[in-house]
Amino acid sequence: MAVLVVAGIIFHELAEAVMGQQAITVLDMQVAHWFNANAVEPFTSLMLGVSAWHSALGMLLMVAALAAYFWRVRARYWLLALMFSVPGGMVLNISLKYIFQRARPVFEEPLVTLSTYSFPSGHTTAATCFYGLLASYLVIARPGWNVRLGTVALCTMMVLLVAFSRVYLGAHYVSDVLAAMAESIAWLAVCITAISTLRRRREGRTV
């Protein structure tokens, strides 16, 4: 509940600031134009690769692979959480895009061109839901603290890398990816809490 409330508040504040054209929108423009003006190879190709891997097709492959693993190890509640968190998070993201209808960054020489809305970032949403769930599972499933800390660090790094790639490529503003992280963390908290509650109730009936 604490995670849900804090993430929800952060998203609300970001959305309010963006829609109210507050100071963060000025920072958004400055950062976006700086990256567009200073984009260099091979870094641009690397960011395009990161972004492409976390597109709809890439995420589908990763979700399918993780789902197959959960099925094989009979982690049925984690499988259920995965099926709700990532697809559900993307549906929520699309809904929020149409609610806020923020235009994407515009440049004279764009690195990528997209016609959909910008706020919040879909790539960052999917990555946060996926890697957040993966980190949650491994922290619980693996007893060693070194493994747990390494897992959280690696998953956090992947989310930040995806978010950075979207800003670097000019597909999103900084506030878009920050809002996507907050939105996804809140949604992930809902999914994991709901599935955990379901598991405890079912196990309680069998005792």
Image (tube, helix red, strand yellow):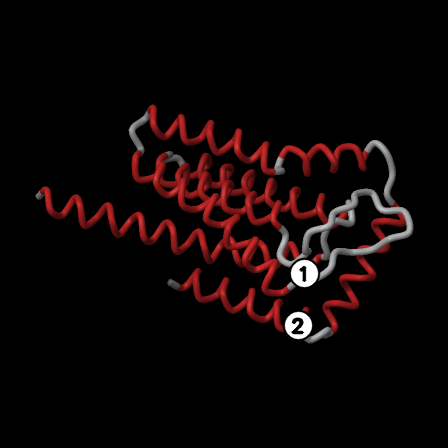
Q: What secondary structure is found at the residue carrying circle 2?
A: helix
Residue carrying label 2 = 17
- How many numbered marks does the figure carry? 2
| Other-residue count near label 2 (Cα within 10 Å), few / some / many at <14 / 14–19 / ≥20 | some
Quadrant housing the N terminus: bottom left
Q: Is residue 194 left or right of residue 45?
A: left
Residue under the point 51% across and 69% down: 9
Residue under the point 51% across and 53% down: 184
Asked if residue 9 is positioned above or below residue 129 in the image, the reply reads: below
Q: Looking at this view, is 102 or 134 the one in front?
A: 102
- Residue 8, label in figure: none
* Amino acid, disc 2: Ala
- Find residue 206 and report its horizontal and vertical position in percent: 10, 42
Q: Quadrant of residue 98 in the image?
A: bottom right
Q: Looking at this view, is 171 or 154 the one in front?
A: 171
Q: What secondary structure is found at the residue carrying circle 1?
A: helix
| Other-residue count near label 1 (Cα within 10 Å), few / some / many at <14 / 14–19 / ≥20 | many
- Tell me how far mark 1 sits from mark 2, CA to CA: 9 Å
Quadrant housing the C terminus: top left
Residue under the point 74% across and 36% down: 48
- Find residue 146 and report its horizontal and vertical position in percent: 46, 36
Q: Looking at this view, is 97 or 178 the one in front?
A: 97
Q: Quadrant of residue 139 in the image?
A: top left
The residue lying furthest to the top in this view is: 72
* Amino acid, disc 1: Ser
Q: Are marks 1 and 2 in contact (CB under 8 Å)?
A: yes
The mark nearer the N terminus, 1 or 2, is 2
Asked if residue 32 is positioned above or below residue 24 in the image, the reply reads: above
Asked if residue 92 is positioned above or below residue 27 in the image, the reply reads: above
Residue carrying label 1 = 175
The residue lying furthest to the left in this view is: 207
- Find residue 42 and report its horizontal and vertical position in percent: 83, 31
